[in-house]
Amino acid sequence: MFRNRKPLPLVSMVLSALYFIYVISLGSSTMIGDEVGGDPGGMVFPLFLAIFMFLVSAALFATDRKDPSSSQGGMTSSQKRLFALTAVVSLLYVVLARPLGYILTTLWLLYILTFYYIQGDVVLKDLKVSLIGFVSSTVVMLALYSIGRKITRSLLLAARKGSIPSLLGSPSAVAGITLVVVTALFVALLFLSRKLLAKWGKSGSVHSAHISALVAIATTEFIYLIFRQLFLVELVRGIITW
Amino acid sequence: MDAFIQGFHQIANLSTIIWMSIGSIVGIILGALPGLTATMGIALMMPIAFQLPTATGIGLLLAVYCGAVSGASIPAILIGIPGNPNAIATVEDGLLMTKKGKAGEALGGAVVASFIGGIGSLIVLVLFSPLVARLTLAFGPAEKTTLALVGLVIIASVSGKNILKGLLMGAFGMALAFLGTDPFSNQLRIPFAKLLATTPLARGMDLTSALIGLFGISQVFFELSKPFEKTAKVDPIKIDKIFPSMRKLRDMWKIILSSLGIGTLIGAIPGTGASIAVFMAYNSAKSITENSKGKLEPLGTGTLEGVFAPEVANNAVTGGALIPALALGIPGDAATAVLIGALMVKGVTPGFHLFATNMSLVYAIFITMLLANIFMALFQLLGVRLYPKVLSVPQQILLPLILILSFIGAYAVAGQATAVGIFNLGIALFMGLVGYFLKKDNYPIAPIVLGLILGGMFEENFRRAVKLAGGNYLVFFTKPICLLFIGFSILSIALPAIKQRRERRK
Amino acid sequence: MKRTVLFLTSVLIILGLGTSLFAGGATETIYPDPEKNITVVVPHAAGGSTDLIFRALADEMKKASGVNFLVTNITGAGSATGANEVINSPADGYMFLGAGTHTTAATMQGLTSGYKDLDYVASLNWDPFIVAVRNDKPWKTFEELVKDAASRPGKISLGNAGMGGATGVASVGLNLAFSKSFNVTPFNGGADLIASVLGGHCDVGIFSQSEVVANSQSFRPLVILTDGHSSLASLASVPTLAEAGYPGITIPGGSFRSVMVKKGTSAEVKKWLADTVDKAFHSAAFEKFQKDNGLIPAFYKLDAFAEYDKTIIADYEVILKEAGLYAM
């Protein structure tokens, strides 16, 4: 009888039951100094909510059945692999962002996902090309980032010492100058890499790696400049300490 | 008048103009890309808005909002795929017009219609929100409790085919909102409280990260579960005539007015949204053309009327939805829910107090709304020839970008606090996966957002009302406003349920 | 093909390593680093009086030092969440807490390790509380209100801007002094409390002076909870508790604001911060701000501030213990 039931309402029933137990275990807490008040306490509402959710999910479990006529064939195996890859890479991103830092994790996430999305599947034979792209995009990224950092720091320090006008040393001006220089370098890189990789043509894994590397590098640096330098959001440094 | 001038000063600067232009363009692009919604656009731009002065930041978000709502009509007209639910009703006549070779007229008409809808509803917003705000003094804890209930129940009942799913999602959102500390006793209400007491979870579920997860990350996974869309090949379309003639507009005045009214009203009802308004406007336009004695062309045959009605309505929703959002702090739709979140993070609490003490900001918001509509019309007209190109950004590149922007967005909300930022990444990913599984089984997402926003408000005011009444739980049945709202909530559950049953019997 | 790839990667690696090394040398340790901002954690919602004070101070500190000061509002659990944020961050001087009596109260209620894990930088000022009602309510004086409350205990509601905060403690203290005859109810911040008192949903409220002044047409101030009169002309006639007929009652009748950093911050950093606060505090703009808002200056630096805070802690301990809020 469970064949055409959906699993979600069942999960929700279990969770509601757990929530109920949890709320009971917390106990009710009324306000201090409520001698003549009548504070219902912190338990009433969550408890009501737990019961409500349990009942609604039970009702859904009973009524919401799979439609046997429209069995949407589900995902193909290559889609499943891409989906799993995305989930794993995202999880790694969350876990590693702090120890490794924004620059590396962001670049890697973008590069890996774009590469395999363009390839359309995760297969072993792409591994070599993807690794080469991975390493070279990391190196280029670090170079680009380091140059940008050097410009930013020298400008800021110079402005503080008073050797350049303070307007040039303001955070937005510095971010702007850095952006212009880095963009120029990136465009040069674009042409150079296009020339070097021309013989592999406009398809195949080398092309994918090339495009993914460029997209990943540009996005990572651009987000860094906008968020870190223009909006002063403290992006994690991790192992890239400069 | 002083407040107006002050408000004007808050936004009369280059940075506001630049950011709003960017917002408008980003909004139109996001709106035009199938699968990306206005709500998601606002959620993605929110971290940037946080870093800007309040009025400029809100202006940016409003520009994204207006742009995304009207940008959705572009793919609907050109390739028959609505960019987001706002343009569902535009597809039929819009695509037919393109097939007839009148794509330019359809696109231009959609822009004009969106502009009329946006400006019209803005006028209503300016006229009525101060009035509504004054009324809110009559809203004590008991009234606020029932009002929050109405918002939750309506969104649960209208967003999706199955009302039980909507209710479950609303309750789930509320349960998430209760994480954190008890507002009355300061007791920690999180699982493993001893372990997690000093983690950011003690502050409760971070609203922005949850929103970004629910709308941004979940969409990435959802798109991944389908085959990659072939990049839309739009045949080179001849675009000559763009603006509808004045006479045509005059002939359509009834359609424009009814769509404007429907859009604004539906927008103003908490919890509803454009996807309902556009169909209602389309239906109403249908009956108007049938009674026009041949003056107007019938809908469904590729006529401008069929594009105008839903496009006026969906942009009218934007102004309408802002009325309860600004006056009461209750969002009119999911997109304004995110906007309220942005206001609250900026330290602006919508409601009477905002109108009483910070009228200049209110005026600034009104002016940015006007600008948002102007920019939207301007950039959309300028870009008419470029859209086919926008539609050809391959998903393979777009999806990783959305994923990373969602992550950075969730992180950046915490600003300087690294620990909180990393924690937010986790929340965003978690909510993204939860959102994916829910979407897959056709559970609506919007009720979760409303539950998250209204849950805290509901519980706090519920307890406050009972406490002020000396422990009397029946206090909600003694006040006329409360009774009205309770009745409204019951009706909005009962009617769709009855309708469902009737349909099932058939 | 292999050779080209090999050549490419080696070029890249050399390029990368070269620039990294060359950029790596650029890190210098100076406080404050020109690239970094100093975050001011305000543990209350933006727009409230605490927030406005620290925003004004941050502006002046920025002018005085050229360093970027960013105000972040981290609310919740009285003021404990914001305090915890500072305590959980590194003791490098790039984050300080908008501390004060709210921190003292939150620490004593066991919500945070608070002042035990914080170091003193500088104190700022006192903001006295005022008890007010809507002006069409029947109580003309504080005495009338107290007598009415005593005659029907629990029927008159006394609102505060949130439990755990300074108004919360003041309202509990007040209720205690008048044999618990009020129905003490917390609201969601000052704005919510004002709207509720204006709308008649709550009878009596505890406000800061600026909140009363902003609504002077509709509020009737009954009593000021400090020993002295208000320095604001429009509130100077509001009686103190003693003048209202209730001498000898001690209530933490105001909120006090100060600057604190995480314990373990180096002495030089603390001195730099204290000196910058000093300059900002004595700037014309901040002095005008304090005068306009009726704030009573109480400036002490470093060790002098630590001594001053001991007296506040001693006062609070008595009241919180009596109110049953003490959980340290």
Image (cartoon, coloured by chain):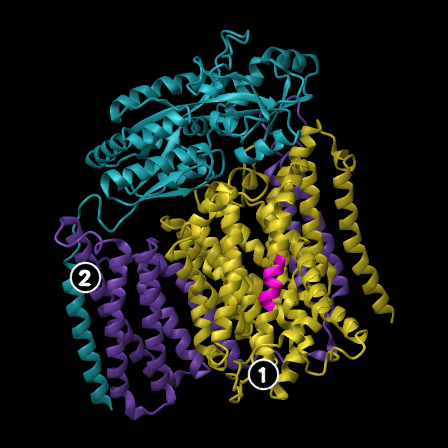
Marked residue chain, label 2: A
Q: Which residue is mark 2?
A: A150
Where, quadrant-wise, is the C terminus of chain A in this rendering? bottom left
Q: Which residue is mark 1?
A: B103
Helix, strand or loop for disc 1: helix
- Disc 1 crowd rating (10 Å Cα; few below 14, some 14-19, many 20+) is many
Find residue C317 and report its horizontal and vertical position in percent: 44, 19
Location of residue C20 (image quadrant): bottom left
- The purple-coloured chain is labelled A
Where, quadrant-wise, is the N terminus of chain A in this rendering? bottom right
| Cα–Cα gap, marks 2 and 1 | 51 Å
Figure disc tally: 2
Rendered position, C271 above or below B244? above
**What amino acid is found at the position of numbered circle 1 in the picture?**
Ala
Location of residue B300 (image quadrant): bottom right
What residue sits 41% from the left and 23% below the top? C294
**Bounds of the magenta segment:** B114-121
The reply to whether residue B203 is visible in this rendering is yes
Rendered position, B460 above or below B156? above
**What amino acid is found at the position of numbered circle 2 in the picture?**
Lys
